[in-house]
Amino acid sequence: MNLILFTESDFCNTQHICLRDRRHKHIADIHKAQPNSLLRIGQINGHKGTGKVISIDDQQVTLHISLSTPPPAALPLTLLLALPRPKMLKRILQTASTMGVKELYLLNSYRVDKSYWSTPLLSEDSIKEQLLLGLEQAGDTQMPCVHIRKRFKPFVEDELPSISLNTRGLVAHPYDAISCPEPTTDPTTLAIGPEGGFIPYEVEKLQQAGLTPFHVGERILRVETAIPAIISRIFPII
Amino acid sequence: MNLILFTESDFCNTQHICLRDRRHKHIADIHKAQPNSLLRIGQINGHKGTGKVISIDDQQVTLHISLSTPPPAALPLTLLLALPRPKMLKRILQTASTMGVKELYLLNSYRVDKSYWSTPLLSEDSIKEQLLLGLEQAGDTQMPCVHIRKRFKPFVEDELPSISLNTRGLVAHPYDAISCPEPTTDPTTLAIGPEGGFIPYEVEKLQQAGLTPFHVGERILRVETAIPAIISRIFPII
């Protein structure tokens, strides 16, 4: 937890927040905070700054807050991911959130096992929990939006063309592909397939919707490794 | 398993290999291979190619092998990592191996908990297992070398200067740092610290040994995310 995040509901008055949950435990056990200790804090979807410990006991900690710094810039990226297997989903949501992704579509694909769609990890609360962990790691405050699309074709035909319009459209795909494009800050739409990749029909549909196949090299990366490797290559700053 | 790896000891004669372990299971259950099925194979520290199934039963599979393709190029990189917590070590070894790291030093640092050094995951067999999984994922055959250095100061003073000599020496460190250097294929020595980072004394010692602090941006990345993000930025091809 490199940043302690809070929301409107944590305010006890305009300048103070009271924390009782795992954040209290972290402040007590890891920071071993005492009155007057200074902690890095951030308001979700707001600024970052400093929290000064006013009081701390076994139950809760009260912080006087002072917010002045904007969060890191969001990536100008819409990321489309074939739904990963549940075992990987938590970590991948954290990774995307840590890297600064703010628009994420979890998408069906031929090689996504149907059973993956019934995982409780796709509940709104569970997704939010992982995104929050990613923000805490990065030192970011801006909560990403996750969109769930259980049907590939209607999404790619009806929604994707307007998402990818006027963006740099890319799909990570090793065959008949261009080399990885140069880093730019252009708005980008990037699709990353499932284990085993998108099938040719899907790549064709993604191309029709404005995405160009590209590769980053000969090695086949796991999705959780491909996300930072690709983002780090196509944007000049992360 | 994007590549089925074998060694000298798997040969039953000069052109055939016989596999009985998890590779047999993978070929039977995932590939559902039959006689004449073609599989992507690679000899550890050798070439890649095709294995044609000669026979398969409940116990073993026999493949006729034909090797022609060299493995992906190794990264011209020596990676120094502060020893990660055991929970993360397996995954980080896999990630480094998948990305093409061939020389990896696991290093002590002030913020490495002493208990991490007693994990059974540091046994030679356990490390090799994770490196192998990384190669199978990437489609690589060249086994990385992992060196264990339990004492920071003697390593940095006595060994590191000759390792970093005539290489691009870098330490990922967000303070008083240059921006991430441009991608080149120059031989590189890269150090990545523990959770919480190297302490100032350690950064100073690493600088004296030829490494320059640099940062990749404002976000704080987990080591397993930093490895692909940084490698992907400092080398033109991965």
Image (spheres, coloured by chain):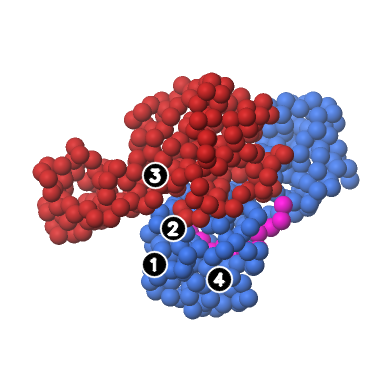
Chain colours: A blue, B red
Measure how far apart labels 4 and 1 are at the Cα level: 16 Å
Q: Are marks 3 and 1 in contact (CB under 8 Å)?
A: no
Element at badge 1? loop
Question: What mark, if any, has residue A169 been given in the picture?
Answer: 4
Measure how far apart labels 2 and 3 are at the Cα level: 16 Å
Vertical placement of residue B141 versus B9, above or below: below
Q: Amino acid at mark 3?
A: Gly
Vertical placement of residue B172 versus A163, above or below: above
Q: Which residues are magenta?
A: A72-86
- Report which residue position mark 1 lands on: A175
Q: Are marks 4 and 1 in contact (CB under 8 Å)?
A: no
Measure how far apart labels 1 and 2 are at the Cα level: 11 Å
Measure how far apart labels 3 and 4 are at the Cα level: 29 Å
* Mark 1 or mark 2: whose residue is earlier in sequence: 1
User: Which residue is depicted at the point 60% across and 61% down?
Assistant: A183
Q: Amino acid at mark 4?
A: Gly
